[in-house]
Image (tube, coloured by chain):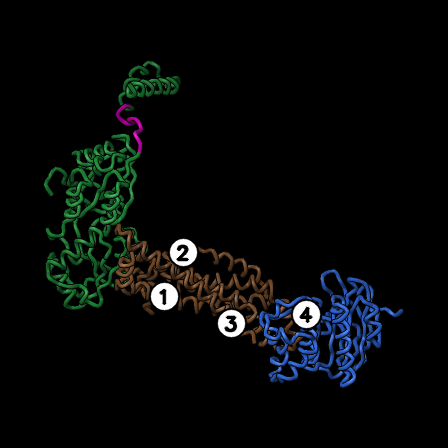
Chain colours: A brown, B green, C blue
Amino acid sequence: MLEWLKSVVSDPDILSAVRVTFTMAVCSTGIASVLGITFGLMLERFRFPGKKIVIRLNRTLMGSPPVVVGLIVYLLLMRRGPLGPLSLLFTIQGMVIAQTMIITPIICGMIYSYLRRSAPSIREFAVTMGATRWQTTRLIIRELRKEIYFCMVTGFGRSISEVGAVMLVGGNIRGRTRTMTTTISLLKSQGIFTEGVALGILLLLMAFVLQWICDMLQREEMEHENY
Amino acid sequence: MKKLTAAFLVTVMCIGLTACGGQSEEPAESEETDAAAEEQTEEAAPEDKGTLMMATTTSTEDTGLLDYLQPLFKEDTGWDLEWTAVGTGEALAMGESGDVDVVLVHAKSSEEEFVAEGYGVERFPVMYNDFIVVGPSSPIEKTDDINAVFTQIINDQLPFVSRGDDSGTDKKEKGIWEELGLDPATDPNYVESGQGMGATITMADEQQAYCLTDRGTWLKQSQDATLDYQLDIVCEGNDSLLNQYGVIAVNPEKYPEVNNEGANDFIEWICSDEVQKLIGEYGVEEYGQALFTPNAGTDA
Amino acid sequence: MKITDLEKKIGTFRLQIDHLVIESGRIHGIIGPNGCGKTVLLKTLAGIYTPDRGTIDYEGISPREITMLSQRPYLMDTSVYKNLVYPLQVRHMRPEEEKVDALLEKAGLLAQKKQYARSLSSGERQKLSFLRAVIFHPKLVMIDETFSNLDPESEALFMEMIRKIQEEDPITWIIVSHQLEAVRQLCEVIHHMEKGSVVEL
């Protein structure tokens, strides 16, 4: 069992899939977090005409099938598409664009609902403390950091587990855009199940480690913050 | 006994129907119509026998051949044909695990191995289509020399999209490289899509790359695509590019629960002269040429 | 501080103050039944609500010199110490450790200095938020019902601290409470509110 796992983990194709998956997931989660948190904060902070429609649209996008997003990004990036000259189709950058489009609404929607619950009382408190607008925003972000971590982990989890959009936009090119999930899909199509299961275990393990790191971060911060 | 009951029921139904319809028409002819209907119906709708599960390659589904044959098969034998279209590797794996009753694939040596290991009963050749190389018409000029094309791709480091999914087409392509003693990995523009034929052709079009495909998928894809492919056939007509399909029943001695009766009916049916003729005509109307050439009964 | 023609609507409730003078350097009490608009008035004065109409002349007190203690004070998701020094941090002031410790000591919270603020008991929370409100030397402090939830010992402590501040460097206080006794003992001026307005008795 251990030997088998070792041989799977040292396989260059699998290593490359892990690398591609991580590069893609880290980049897209990073960009989506910045965008999603900013949009979420703005959505909670400002009133503007059509806000309800924006919120409803965001909720719809939260549940949009990744494959549809993948198709849209594909059409944008294809050689004869509007962004064709950038040559981003079948590249990790292209996959990051698709993933960002999938994850941003999720993070934005989650953050928005957390904010709606707790931002008003934090804001009142900040006013009584004499905090400036900027300090208030920073305070809100700091007070909601656990929720933000949670959103980011959720986004990351979505990103590493997604198949449809990365298959379409990335093209599942061996050694370049082949992720862990598309590798599993390919292995299955070849009737090879053992390696597929091994990759699946690896993915689950990663999700577990991620969760654990997140927990550690929070705990450490608590101890740190004690003074 | 069962058959007799069924025949009786069908007859009664026919008489009833004709009687109903006949009232407004000419009652004088009703006896004759009865007899004709009886005969016709018995031939056209034999008893419903159940489901036959087949594993096959994406090309037979992508070309629409199976959709065309399925209702005819049901009509002729009473079996409901269902299939899952996957790569040859996976199709054979499904047969090896007894998940399907019959396989229709195109990788002769793997098929023979499948039979030799006792998973399949016997392999029967059914038909062939041929492989072609598609890609931009420059720098490769149209030829029938597959070796020259493949050599030029490596020498000039031209972009090439391989399926890389262990499918029949993929095995064919790998075989050509091997025969020529070339290593495609030395071409930095050689990529493996790990996807089906259709997706791979689309990718080749996007990248303006070359790829090896079966003619049937190419014809159907290039006709149906929303945006016209900017690819041409750059190599065709070489004997070594023939793609032979074989059909094999999964061995009931290994998996007693498989539908061997249905599998045998299917093999007999698809190899029959009548169906072979239908296969030879399929696609002529729509694409101007046949997608498959039938050759059951040969030793291909 | 002068309030003229102030109006603020929250849902169906309407706060209407034609004229109210809050003399600086004194302790004012506001009493009145539930729902008479005491909290709305305080929140409007604190700048949490913007008035629909009317003017508030703070007479030289800047918004950053005003603070308010809510009925249920908000404690940040961090330690007691960090909560206490937050108003200083906001003003880019360095906390002086001895003074901070002395303050905590007085309120009996020194042992909990490094503890997680939200694990404090409700009485301790009130004390912490009181300290946090006065640590940056504001000019106007408003207290919303805080006295209602205190045990006698803490109440006495609060009163003592308020008196001490008034002896050293008098500031303006507005205290809203049900507990007439406490308000009478402490406050120099008492206003009555009813149905969104200040009434003279």
Q: Which residue is mark 2?
A: A68
Amino acid, disc 3: Glu
What distance separates the C-alpha of mark 3 from that of mark 4? 23 Å
Which of disc 2 and disc 3 is earlier in sequence? 2
Q: On the picture, is C36 further left or further right than A105?
A: right
**Number of the front mark, 2 or 1:** 1
For discs 2 and 4, the disc positioned in front in the rendered view: 4
Q: CA distance from mark 2 to mark 1?
A: 23 Å
Q: Along the line of sight, which residue is nearer the eye, B205 or A147?
A: A147
* Residue C27 percent across, percent down from the top left: 80, 77
Circle 3 chain: A
- Residue behind mark 3: A221
Residue marked by disc 1: A22
On the image, the x and y values in percent for residue C125 come to 67, 69
Residue at which label 4 appears: C124
SS category of the residue bearing label 1 = helix
